[in-house]
Image (tube, grey):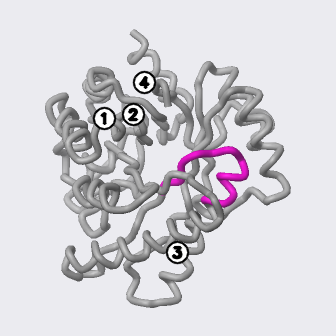
Amino acid sequence: MKQLLFGTAGIPLSADPRTTLDGIKQVKKLGLGCMELEFVRSINITKEKAPEIRKVASENDIALTCHAPYYINLNSLEKPKIKASIQRIVNSARITNLCGGYSVCFHPGFYMGLDPKKVYDTVKKNLKEIVTILKKENNNIWVRPETTGKATQFGDVDEILKLSQELDNVMPCVDFAHFHARTNGKYNSYKEFCSIFEAIEKKLGKKGLENMHIHITGIAYGEKGEKHHLTLKESDLKFEELVKAIKDFNVKGVAISESPNIEGDALLVKKIYDK
């Protein structure tokens, strides 16, 4: 990526009708540069439909990413659930690739009360299998475990960066609201945001900052972490300080708004960034 693109998690609310194709066109009309395909409940795009989406995204110069289904746990205690999780990520990556998308993110799993080091090894083994399957299919999509919003979920910044260091075609999806909620209100200042970018640069080099998949939203949280998403202005997230850190580290890639008002907050963040 030569720049940072701003966009929506899913079809903009203002798209009419609310189809993927109209969503891409509406993203363009709004002056945004990317859209995340939301497969969170099911992979809702067929192989047959994907080439049309690819064509419209290309014509409108809109970058596509995807969020794989929520029902994923690469550390499940039940083997069929791990197998199903791997399949969901692989299928999401296949369809996204056919749509011309370049990045697939997902919540990797839960600790299940186990030693985090053992959980890391299990997640890494299963993630390696995903990458191997995709490579055999000549699918070089970026596979991105996401920083998660609860301490019971696998996915703090260090774990995600270590996976990215150790596996091919794996890079982080950094959700700043999740990390803010996970730490019960920390990671909410310019200095703390900078520390995340510093860690990325230290572990992954400049290329880590030039190939980022970011999620930005407001968030409600408590002692156990994330509760639900809020608009930026309803939340306590210091998003202007976050944007300053993004700018100062010359971050490139995509910044996806997951706010309840997806395009409103995407445009708000873009406006602050451009200013």
* CA separation in Å, label 1 and label 4: 23 Å
Residue type (three-letter) at the residue carrying disc 2: Glu
Residue type (three-letter) at the residue carrying disc 1: Lys
Give, as a single range, the part of the protein colored magenta. Answer: 93-105
* CA separation in Å, label 2 and label 1: 6 Å
Instruction: Give the SS element for disc 2.
Output: loop
> Which numbered disc, 3 or 4, marks the residue that appears first in the sequence?
3
Number of the label disc, if any, that sits on residue 159: none
> Which numbered disc, 1 or 4, marks the residue that appears first in the sequence?
1
Q: Residue at x 57, y 63 (%)?
A: 135
Instruction: Mark 2 vs mark 4: give the one in front.
Output: 2
Instruction: Mark 3 vs mark 4: give the one in front.
Output: 3
Label pair 2/1, CB-CB below 8 angstroms: yes
Label pair 3/2, CB-CB below 8 angstroms: no
Instruction: Mark 3 vs mark 2: give the one in front.
Output: 2
* CA separation in Å, label 3 and label 2: 29 Å
Q: Is residue 116 visible?
A: yes
Residue type (three-letter) at the residue carrying disc 4: Val
Q: Which residue is mark 2?
A: 210
Q: Is residue 73 left or right of residue 100?
A: left
